[in-house]
Amino acid sequence: MNKKIAIILAFAVAVCSIFTSGCAGVKVRTFYALDTSIKITAYNCTDEIIDSMVERVNSFDAIFNIYNKDSEIYKLNQEGRLEEASETLVSVLSQSLNYASMTEGAFDPTIGAVSMLWDFENGTVPKDEDIQSALKTVDYKNVAISGKRIILKNGAKLDLGAVVKGYAVGNIASRLKLDGIKRATLDFGGTVYVFGEKSIKVGIQTPFGKAGEISAEIAAAGQTVVATSGNYQRYFDKDGKRYHHILDPKTGYPVNNGLQSVSVIGSTAAMDDAFSTALFVLGREKATELINRVKGMQAVFISDDDTMYHTSGLEYDGNYTFTIKQNG
Ligand code: ADP
Ligand code: MG
């Protein structure tokens, strides 16, 4: 075979194999898990890799879904103890206890007894006496972990909904990187993890705007997590009052402190997610104090009158875009 033909043939084979293995370009997968809609966009990826990520996310769902009778957390909540908890549950729970202590209980993973009283689909306000008795069980110090054993004291019930999407998105990002993926955007119901591009922009959703309508963008480099908690994500109106899904662990009622959303910009995913909830509960002033003590984390607040505020490690161009200061 002459050399020119051989080269053309080799090129054709290479191109074909790229298309048949599905390696070329970008893979996008959207699915529902962890009580939210999830979108994985990965570049130079295969269907096999994406399939295994979906399976992995579903396996987290089987651990953390408090309404699924077969889940590990359901059993733990029912029985108050587990002797052989999975490594994943032990790990996420112990991280959560740490975040609870850092936020002085503004994020509290034992909010379960209270959060399960609130039904945002049907829009019913629980009886105050039920809230008061459930509140007695809410205290992250009611959780004891020793090895694989988890004990919930004083009737405490877990709800890890405020941290699990962050944990999952961080875990999937690490797995993708281990599988050789160099660039991806992972959106787990408002907790977004991007990595790989020189310049990455992540939008901050406009509260009560259309899906995808954004109020600002975070421009970052390399690897960034943007985790948003807002009162517009899950709520209902009743008798002229709005009730939403971010609860004050001290009162058992939705937090009402002048904020519509808090977006945390960080790189640790699980912590960013837990903190987005905690900062919302704390309110802008206390949240800013707390974030100033935490390394590598910034926040954008959108108040009830649509004003945007941000922490000192971010720079705003006055128009639309936030950038992270080098030494922020
Ligand atoms: P989303 O789940 O919409 O992204 P969050 O990350 O803020 O929003 O998590 C809110 C969920 O966390 C609620 O649906 C509830 O299950 C739980 N939760 C609500 N308030 C708290 C709190 N103060 N501490 C811990 N978990 C909370
Ligand atoms: Mg959260």
Image: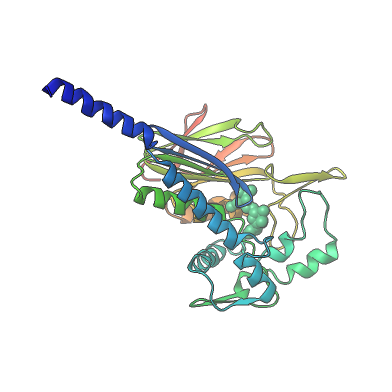
Residue at screen point 55% across, 54% down: 58
x and y, in percent, of residue 187 in the image: 53, 42
Q: Is residue 233 left or right of residue 126?
A: left
x and y, in percent, of residue 109 in the image: 61, 64
Q: Is residue 31 left or right of residue 137?
A: left
| Above or below, 136 relative to 220 | below
Residue at screen point 43% across, 46% down: 48
* Camera-side residue of 79 and 15: 15
| Above or below, 100 relative to 47 | below
Number of on-image labels: 0
Task: Confirm whether residue 283 shows in the render.
Answer: no
Q: Quick one: quadrant of the C terminus? A: top left
x and y, in percent, of residue 9 in the image: 22, 26
x and y, in percent, of residue 320 in the image: 52, 28
Residue at screen point 57% across, 50% down: 276
Residue at screen point 60% across, 55% down: 162
* Camera-side residue of 103 and 93: 93
Colour pattern of the rendering: rainbow
Q: Quick one: quadrant of the N terminus? A: top left
Q: Is residue 93 left or right of residue 175?
A: right
Q: Quadrant of ligand 1?
A: bottom right
* Camera-side residue of 218 and 81: 81
Q: Is residue 58 left or right of residue 9?
A: right
Q: Quadrant of residue 75?
A: bottom right
Task: Confirm whether residue 126 shows in the render.
Answer: yes
Outermost right residue: 239
Q: Quadrant of residue 128?
A: bottom right
Outermost front residue: 1
